[in-house]
Amino acid sequence: MNRFLSCDWGTTAFRLRLVGAAGLKIIAEESTKQGIAETFQLWRQTERSEDMRLPFYLDIISRHIQTIEEKTRTSLEDLPLVISGMASSTIGMIDLPYKKLPVSVDGSDLTIHTIESTGQFKNKAFIISGLRTDDDVIRGEETKLVGCAANSFNQGDQIYIFPGTHPKHVEVKNGVATGFKTYMTGEFFELLSKKSILSVSVKEGEGLESKKSLQSFKNGVKDSINSNLLHNCFLVRTNDVFKKLTAEENYHYLSGLLIGAELGSLINNSTQITVIGGAALSAQYVTALQVLDSSKQVTTEDADEALIKGQVQVYRKLMNIL
C-alpha cells in the first residue's frame, strides 16, 4: 500500500485525506461541515428505502474523492478507504455494534465492516466501529488510541485523555484497553458560557498566552479542588459583579473550573498520562494536570496524526501486513 484514503466523519464535520503510506504524509485534503448528523437528515428527506442509505453516503464520499482527483490530477481508483468516527453509528452509513472491552490496542481487536468496490464506488472501504463498557461508549477515539498505544505492550498502566466536547479517559494496561470514562466538560462549558446567567460574565478572548488569562485558568483549576463545582460556577458571576476579573479572564476561570473538576480524580495518580488532541486544548489539559500535581509528567500527541496512524495500523492488521 503506497497510498490510502483516510476519512474522519464526525457528528458535525467531514474530512477526507489522501495519505502517502511512507511517512504518513498528507498529499491532499477535502473537508466540510457536513457531518453525519446533517447527512442523516438529508438522507431522511429523500424518503428512500433503507437499503439505499449506504449508497447515499458513499455518493457523498465519491464526490469528495473526485475533487481530490482533480486537485492531484491522478486517479484514486482501487485505493483502500479507511473510515472512522460516526459513520458506524445508528445515524451513519451502517449501524455497527460496539466492541466490548477489554480490547487490544494493536488494531487487531476492533469491529470492522468491509465494503467491496463496485462499478459505482471503486474503492474498497473499511468502516471502524467504536468501543463500549457496560455503561459507556466511544466512537472515533478508538482509532486514535490505536495510533498512539499500539506499541504499549509491556509498558504498564497508562491513561489516554481525549479532550473535546465529551472528553474520554481510557485506561490501558500492557497493551489492552480495560476501561474508560466519558465527561461532559466541553458541553457543560458551552451551555454555561452561552446559555446560562454566566454568559453575561464571560467573553472569549486571547488564549493562555496572556499571563492574566493563564493565571485565571490556573486559579479555576485550583478552586475546583477545594470546593463544590456547583458553588464554584457561581463565583464566575460574582467575579464579574465585584469586578475581580474581566470577562475574558472569567472565561478562562470557568474553563479551569470544569477541566479541573474533570481531572480531579487523577491527583496523586502515578499512571503515565498521554493527552491526544489539538494544540490549544492539549495545552489546557497539560497545564491543568500540572496544577493538580506539579510532579506529573504528561505526554501529548496530535489527534490528526494519531487518527491516521491508527487507521494505517488497523488496515495493516486486517490485511496481515507487517
Image (cartoon, rainbow, N blue to C red):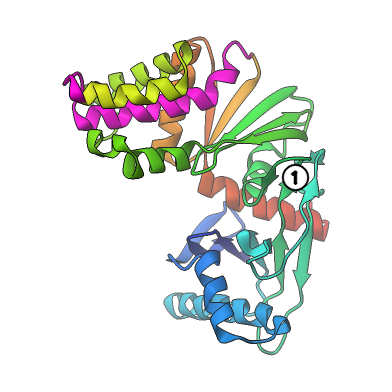
Corner quadrant of residue 33:
bottom left
Q: Secondary structure at mark 1?
A: strand
Q: Is residue 190 visible?
A: yes
Q: Is residue 17 visible?
A: no
Please say whether residue 285 is one of the residues in the magenta stretch. no
Quadrant location of the N terminus? bottom right
Above or below: residue 274 compared with residue 88: above
Residue in the picture at 64% in, 44% down: 147
Left or right of 208? Residue 177 is: right
- What kind of secondary structure does the magenta stretch mostly adopt? helix
Nearer to the camera, 270 or 169 = 169
Amino acid type assigned to the residue bearing label 1 in the image: Arg
Residues rendered magenta in the picture: 241-269
Above or below: residue 109 compared with residue 207: below
x and y, in percent, of residue 62 in the image = 57, 79
Left or right of 171? Residue 205 is: left
Farthest bottom residue in view: 119
x and y, in percent, of residue 288 in the image = 44, 22
Above or below: residue 282 compared with residue 157: below
What residue is shown with label 1? Answer: 132
Left or right of 196? Residue 113 is: right
Residue in the picture at 41% in, 29% down: 284
